[in-house]
Amino acid sequence: MLKQVYTYKLKFEFEAGGSLPGLTVAYHCSPREYRQGDKVVWITHALTANSDAEDWWPQLVGPGKLIDTEKYFVVCVNMLTSPYGSSSPSSLNPETGKPFYFDFPKVTVRDIVRANILVRKSLGIEKIDFLLGGSIGGFQALEWCIMEPEVVKQAAFIATCSRVTPWVTAGMETQRMALEADQTFRQCESLAGGAEGLKCARGQALISYRHFNGYEKTQAEESDDTLFADRAASYERYQGRKLVNRFDAYSYYYLTYAVDSHNVGRGRGGVEAALKQVKAKSVVVAIDTDCLFPVCKQREFAEGIEDCRYYEIKSSFGHDGFLLEYAQLTEIIQPMLEAM
């Protein structure tokens, strides 16, 4: 996929208050210009992913693959507040010449979708044939189907929900507490601030993304004579270092609040009324071991959409199954692509 940058030169007002004189929105798309009549597949990405879906969903996205970037016009936009090219707390504030840090406005899922819509319009795309996203990508996809019900024809909401739960918010707050516990975080001296806190936050998050069964399969000690178990501990430390090498604590902090903003019923008479506004032919895909978005909540949310099928895939890897169980996802997604 080809990386592009869209610059919006007008004032952008944020839902929670505050504004910017313009936005930068990074995105990846099929390596050619959009042509009227192209079948459009739009992917919305998860918390710390980027707009290059071939990078984080390599088994599903790319030339000749299920989501064929040559057969379809495929687009994925980098979320606002993410450090992969879109406007974020790590972007330079033109008034100070330094990163925004905490002067950046708080961002909601609706703001993120509005940025997607700006890119859609800039590309001249009037209809999206298939919109899909997992986790907070699913937040975006669902919100978009309500904001522009006439634009989206088909949608897949994977490992997600219609309103953030207390369980998820508790996890987000715990991760913010880890960032705040790093004394360099509030000093705002460089984008390396809060790095140790971010490592800890990532470790906490990873436990909620995975499942007991997955850790038993991949992180169990190999020796029967182990004195102090360390394999899972080493894995947590490794994942913390890995995220710090590609992300900053300020962007992460803001993204956790974007998660907490998710509530499709806000200002629409509640979740039930909002879901009735979805006109896309939809599927909800749950994962049987998902601790973040339990199947009971996903089944409930699927029942609220008029034209919707519910699927449940099996995985030992919890919430992260949406990134790993590509064979099961293919069985669900392929018929939708063929129906376009």
Image (cartoon, rainbow, N blue to C red):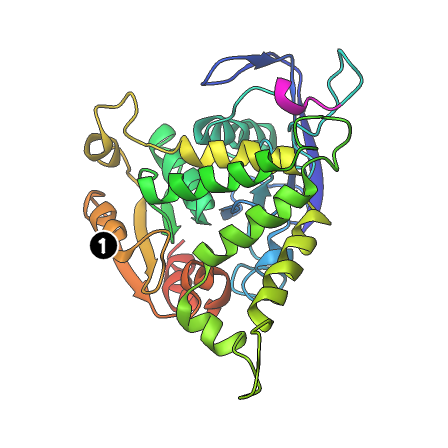
Can see residue 263? Answer: yes
Characterize the local packing of mark 1: few (<14), some (14-19) or many (20 or more) Cα atoms within 10 angstroms: few
Check the image and name the residue furthest to the bottom. Answer: 224
- x, y percentage for residue 284? 31, 53
Q: Where is residue 4 in the image (x, y as percent from the top left)?
A: 70, 38
Depth order, front residue of 302/292: 292
Quarter where residue 35 is shown: top right
* Prevailing SS of the magenta stretch: helix
**Which is nearer the eye, 138 or 253?**
253
Compared with residue 327, is residue 3 higher up or lower down, i.e. above or below? Answer: above
Amino acid at dot 1: Cys
Residue 99 in picture, x, y percent from top left:
73, 24
Q: In this view, does 213 lie to the left or right of 22?
A: left
Residue in view at x 60 percent, y 57 percent = 56
Closest to the observer, 126 or 230: 230
Q: Which of 63 and 232 is in front in this view?
A: 232
- Residue 282 on the magenta span: no
Q: Does residue 165 appear anywhere in the picture?
A: no
Please tell me which residue is depicted at 57% across the width and 44% down the height of the picture: 76
Q: How many marks on residues?
A: 1
Q: Give the range drawn in magenta.
A: 99-103
* SS at mark 1 in the image: helix
Give the vertical position of 151 relative to 314 (above or below): above
Residue located 57% across and 57% down the image: 71
Q: Position of residue 128 (x, y in %)?
A: 45, 41
The residue to which callout 1 is attached is 296
Q: Which residue lies furthest to the front in this view?
A: 227
Residue 167 occupies which quadrant of the picture? top left
